[in-house]
Amino acid sequence: MGSDFFQWASEVLDPKKAFLKPEALKGIRVLELCTLIFGPVVPDWLSEFGAEVIKVELPGMGDTMRYVTPYGFFWKNISPAFQEQNHNKYHVGLDVRTPEGKELFLDLARRCDVVVENLRAGTMDKWGIGYRDLLEVNPRIIYLANNGFGQWGPFAHGRPSYDAIAQSVSGLMAVSGFPGRPPLKSGVWIGDFTGGCMSAVAVLAALYYREKTGKGQYIEFSQGENLMRWLDWTWLYAHFTGKNRPQAGNRDLAICPADIVRCKDGYVAIAAFSEEEFKGLCEAMGKSELARDPRFSDPLERLKEENAAVVLEAVREWAREKTVREIDELGAQYGFASSPVLDAKAQYESEHWRARGAVWEYNDPIYGTMVEWGPAPKLSETPGRVKWGARPVGVDNEHVFIRVLGLAPSRLKELEEKGTIGKWVDRVGQKPPEDWDGESGLFYP
C-alpha cells in the first residue's frame, strides 16, 4: 500500500469539508408520523444525507420520546433519548385525527416522496391517512410502515412491541449472556437502531426503483424479523446439529482467542484469528511455544473446546498482570487486535473519533454546543452531516404550513385557535421565539 494512501483518504473524506459538498438526497422530502425510536431514526438517517424531513407530532407534548430518558433528564421539550434520532428535521404540531388535520396531512403527502410511520398496524388507515388513502393524492409515494411484528399475521393485531420484546422474540436474547445465567438484553436499543438502518436501506431501494419505473410502493418492516437476520450462523448451526447456539458471555465462539479480559485497571478486547496474529499474541505473552503447538497453531483446531480453554486461560492470566494501556500498545506492536473497552467519556475525548467526525460537535441555535455521534458512512462526494438538533413541537409550523403548503397566516391562526395545529409551551408559559421563520438563515440554510 502506498504511503500516500492515508493522506489521500484523510483529505477526500475529511468531515470538515462536508458542508462544502452536495447532498446525495437533496430534493427528497420525507413526511414522518412516528414516535419513540424505530420510526424516527429512519428519517433521521435520511436527513443526514440531505433529505428534507417534516416531523408531525400532536400539538403540545408531542412525541412520547421527548420525555423518555433515565432520571427524568430533559430540557426545552426534548430529552437526550429524543435528540439522538431527530436531527435535521422540521417539527410541526398537527392533530391528524381531526378532519382539518387529516386534510393538511394529505396535502403534505401530496408534496412528499416518502412517508414513514411506526404506529400499530391499521392505525393510519383508521385515521384515513394510510397508504391507500395517500395513493389517491400521490401515486408515486413510498410508504414505510415500521412496527414490532409487521402489518399482518397473528401478532400484528393490536400487540405492542418495544426493543426488549424484539430482542426476545427474535432469539437474540436467548444467545446473549453467560453460560448458566439468565438471558441478557443488549444495553442499548439495538432492535430500534438496526431496524431503522435496514428500513432506510429499503427506502433507498424503493427510491431507486421509482427512478427507473416512476412507481412508488408500500414497505412494511418488522423489528423482530430484522433482528433474526442479525443472528449470523445461529440458524444454520441449529439446522445441521439440532442444537441451540450456546451462551458464551463475551467470548466469540467463531474465533479463538476473541474475548473481553480483565486487566489491572479495566477491561480490554483481544482477538487473534490468523496465524500471524496468533503468533504475535503468543510472543507478546512470552509464550511462543503455544503458536508452535499443533493444537493451537491452526485456527480451526483452536476452536475445539478443550484447546480453546487452554488458550483463553493463558490470555486471561497474562492480561491480569497488565494495564489496559500496556495491552493496547502490545497489540499495535505485535499485530494482534486489541482495544480498551471505552466508556462515553473516553469516546468523547478520543482524538481518533473526533478527527473522523464520529464525535460531532456543532452549535445548535436553540441548545447551544452539542456533541453527538456523526454520520458513520463516509462518502467522498456527498458526505452526511448534522445541521441542527431536535426542536420543540411546532417550532416550524410557519415554515411548513405557510412556505411549503402556502397557507395564509390568517388561516394558520384560525387552525391554532381550533387546536388543529399548535406549539409546545413550557411550564412557565414561554413559547419558542415568534421570529423563527427562517429569515435569519439559522434554521433554514
Image: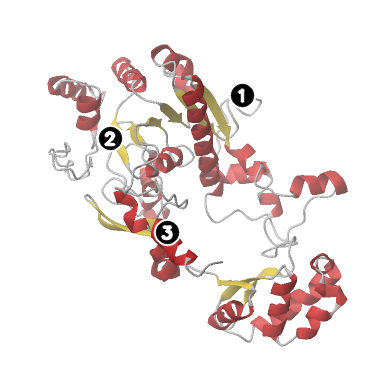
What is the secondary structure assignment of the residue under circle 3?
loop
Location of the C terminus (image quadrant): top left
Q: Report if residue 381 is visible in the image.
A: yes
Q: Kindly identify which residue carries mark 2.
A: 60
N-terminal-most mark, 2 or 1:
2
Say few, some or many: other residues with alpha carbon within 10 Å of mark 1 (under 14 / 14 to 19 / 20 or more): few
Judging depth in this view, the residue of 323 and 387 nearest the camera is: 387
Residue at point 49%, 64% (across, down): 5
Judging depth in this view, the residue of 190 and 325 nearest the camera is: 325
Q: How far across and down, in percent of the image, does residue 217 sit?
A: 51, 22
Determine the CA span between mark 1 and mark 3: 38 Å
Say left or right for 420 vs 408: right
Name above or below for residue 185 compared with residue 321: above
Say few, some or many: other residues with alpha carbon within 10 Å of mark 2 (under 14 / 14 to 19 / 20 or more): some
Q: Of tags 2 and 3, which is closer to the observer? A: 3
Q: Of tags 2 and 1, which is closer to the observer? A: 1
Q: Kindly identify which residue carries mark 1.
A: 152
What is the secondary structure assignment of the residue under circle 1?
loop
Residue placed farthest to the top in the image? 136
Determine the CA span between mark 2 and mark 1: 32 Å
Q: How far across and down, in percent of the image, does residue 37 sit?
A: 46, 42
Say left or right for 234 vs 418: right
Q: Kindly identify which residue carries mark 3.
A: 358
Name above or below for residue 279 compared with residue 366: below
